Image: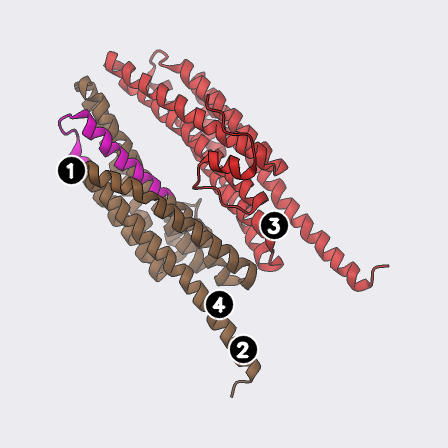
Chain colours: A red, B brown
Amino acid sequence: MASPNNRYDTHISAQYNAELEDVRQRVLAMGGMVEHQVTRAMQALLEIDSDLAREVIENDHRVNGMEVHIDEECSRILARRQPAASDLRLIVAVIKTITDLERIGDEAERIARMSLDLAELDAPRGPHFEIETLGRQVQTMLHDVLDAFARMDPEAALAAAQHDIRIDREYESIMRQCITFMIEDPRSISRVFDIVWSLRSLERIGDHARNIAEYVIYFVHGKDVRHISLEQVAEELGAEPLSKD
Amino acid sequence: MASPNNRYDTHISAQYNAELEDVRQRVLAMGGMVEHQVTRAMQALLEIDSDLAREVIENDHRVNGMEVHIDEECSRILARRQPAASDLRLIVAVIKTITDLERIGDEAERIARMSLDLAELDAPRGPHFEIETLGRQVQTMLHDVLDAFARMDPEAALAAAQHDIRIDREYESIMRQCITFMIEDPRSISRVFDIVWSLRSLERIGDHARNIAEYVIYFVHGKDVRHISLEQVAEELGAEPLSKD
């Protein structure tokens, strides 16, 4: 039977586990909120819905508040619990993840602002179809990355990170179309520019999502994979080689 | 006289201090390297110097390597030394600072790539003068922020952060000029686009530098000032009110 001392330890440890679980849950809640912001920003952009755009812009401070709150909680745990090994890696991964989530929130806000700009221009639709496709890809990637974070699944994280390569390629191609569009119809320049900034924001969201995927891999494998190619990561994890299409 | 036990404590503490100082020095070295990368990327852009641009691009992996190294050192210190209070704040500030430094390095690389693009276009100079001015402002701000970090001086950090407001205003104005330039001379669109991306990178560098300034304030005052206005920060620090010009 456990000694009172042991019971005390278990109690401390259960409390500590609850704190770690609470941090994890808060990151997931922040992730869900950020995902929602991106979805609604894209909707505001595509439907030129200024009310929705303003809502997205107003909500950004809630994302920021979540970041500050989780950050404080992590600092408290570091100071009180002195985590080691995988607990420490979880806290470090969380501190980094919420920075990227906060910046995804900023990009969602930027997209919403572009929607307001477009509404003012009162111009016909530009290369909207393409941004819709890219937007959907980025949203899927973000969703998959957050899912990988929730399950702390490095293979799922890697698969989601690999999606970023396709997004970058798509982004380059749409950007070239935008430039052609502007050259052919210089009156469209201001309008296409709002699309260009939105595309850029989507590409950045992909980059941030990829960062988060890399923190998941770091958390599980204790390996920093940020500055090596995804091919190498796949090899080191013994995962499927990167699909080339 | 100190007991052996006390001496041992002092020894441990001296070693620990040396580790914290080492981390700080490494961040400064990384900051110096990143500053150098930005300066040379701007030079490569303004002088369309492809050799220099390629050097900047090749050097980026050294910046990345520094980030990974410092990150590992921070994790080691967190695990072994279990820092509290201001030591813990230093480590958290460092973990965040190097992320921003690494991203400034990425932006320098992007600017260098735009220089290569411009060299290929073999086109006359576009709105070069304006980007030179903005570039100099951003470089000054980055230098001041790193200086504030070196001295852990929150007032200097705040003054440098306030510079970002002027940079954003300048950036908006140059961006409008670029759009006008393209509308007036659609053949310039591809070329001006490279300038536009470089301007965007400079503006991002200003944002990252501002983040670092905020970490310095957080470190010294234990206050998270990321999502409140600089006016409020100035007020809370009892500093000079924000200059409006």
Pointer 3 local density, CA inside 10 Å: few below 14, some 14–19, many at least 20? some
The amino acid at mark 2 is Tyr
Q: Which residue is mark 3?
A: A86
Task: Say if mark 4 contacts mark 1, CB within 8 Å.
Answer: no
Q: Which residue is mark 1?
A: B47
Residue A40 place in picture, x, y as percent: 50, 24
Inter-mark Cα distance, 3 to 4: 23 Å
> In this rendering, do the residues under marks 4 and 2 share a single chain?
yes
The numbered mark, 1 or 2, whose residue comes first in the sequence reads 2
Q: Observer-nearest residue: B44 or A200? A: B44
Q: Which residues are magenta?
A: B103-130
Inter-mark Cα distance, 2 to 3: 30 Å
> In this rendering, do the residues under marks 4 and 1 share a single chain?
yes
Inter-mark Cα distance, 1 to 2: 58 Å
The amino acid at mark 1 is Glu
Pointer 4 local density, CA inside 10 Å: few below 14, some 14–19, many at least 20? some
In the picture, the disc for residue B16 is 4
